[in-house]
Image (tube, grey):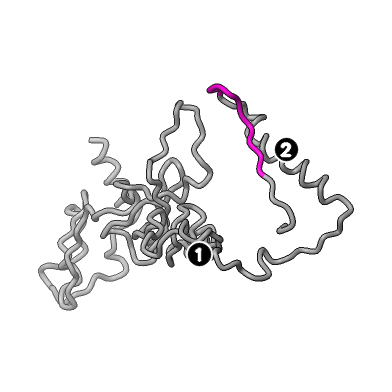
Amino acid sequence: TPYYVGATWYGYDKAVQLTSDENFGAQVIWNAVMTKIHKDMKLEPAEFFDEVPPNIVAREICMDSGKIATELCKADPRGSRVRKEYFIEGTEPSYSDTCKVHVSAMACKEATDAQGRMLLATEYCPPESAFVRVYIKRPVQYMPPFPESPYPEDVIYELPEGEYCTIHGPSHVIIPPVTEDDPDSSGIQYPGDEDVDIHDHENPGNAPGEDDWPDPEDFWRGRRRRNRD
């Protein structure tokens, strides 16, 4: 509320790593004090300022960088990361000091890495899979101190620099186009097909009749026999 201001700090006078139970020590203390202060007061919510003092200025900043927000900050996959902050005049970020944490890049929605980040799209990703995604780019890349250490929960929104889609790639088989005059002009011949001939070469005008088609069982049985040989 705008009625009281409180600040708490939790730690040690010397360098001691906090345990997991101590991570929220400051919040617990702050909540206990503020709850007691407001008990039975029935204070109504109020605007932060009824009238902004002359030495206070407001800026729309990015919650992730603390810099002036951009359109990319509003388009964060988690929802807008923009909020209004008040500063003592002279301490506010300049309008040119914009957020560099939020960036955009072409991503493939079908490809992810071990951390769940969408990988960058390549020229082989189909249009229905590639799209412009807003990522976050940390000023300093987070590296777990130990192999078993967890990553931050927002790691899935990080820009996977240098990591590209592993799902889509160039085709390994190029199929020539089939012309209208020659349906067999593709030129593709599969193993064993050279032994099957259903055309009457002596009388090209004769189309194969129903009795002329090879028996499917004999066809596949012959292929299996050749494969074994």
Left or right of residue 81, residue 184 in this image: left
Helix, strand or loop for the magenta stretch, by majority? loop
Residue 138 image point, x, y percent? 40, 46
Left or right of residue 53, residue 176 in this image: left
Q: Which residues are magenta?
A: 7-16
Label 2, residues with CA under 10 Å away: few <14, some 14-19, many ≥20: some
Q: In percent of the image, x 32 and y 46: which residue is there?
A: 163
What amino acid is labelled 1 in the image? Glu
Q: Nearer the viewer, residue 219 or 29?
A: 29
Q: How many marks?
A: 2
Q: In percent of the image, x 47 and y 54: which residue is there?
A: 66
The residue that mark 2 highlights is 29
Residue 164 image point, x, y percent? 31, 50
State which quarter of the image contains the C terminus: top left
186, above or below 119, in the image: below
Residue 61 image point, x, y percent? 49, 60
10, above or below 124, in the image: above
Q: In percent of the image, x 26 and y 60: which residue is there?
A: 123
The residue that mark 1 highlights is 60
Residue 145, quarter of the rendered image = top left
What amino acid is labelled 2 in the image? Ile
Left or right of residue 152, residue 38 in this image: right
191, above or below 60, in the image: above
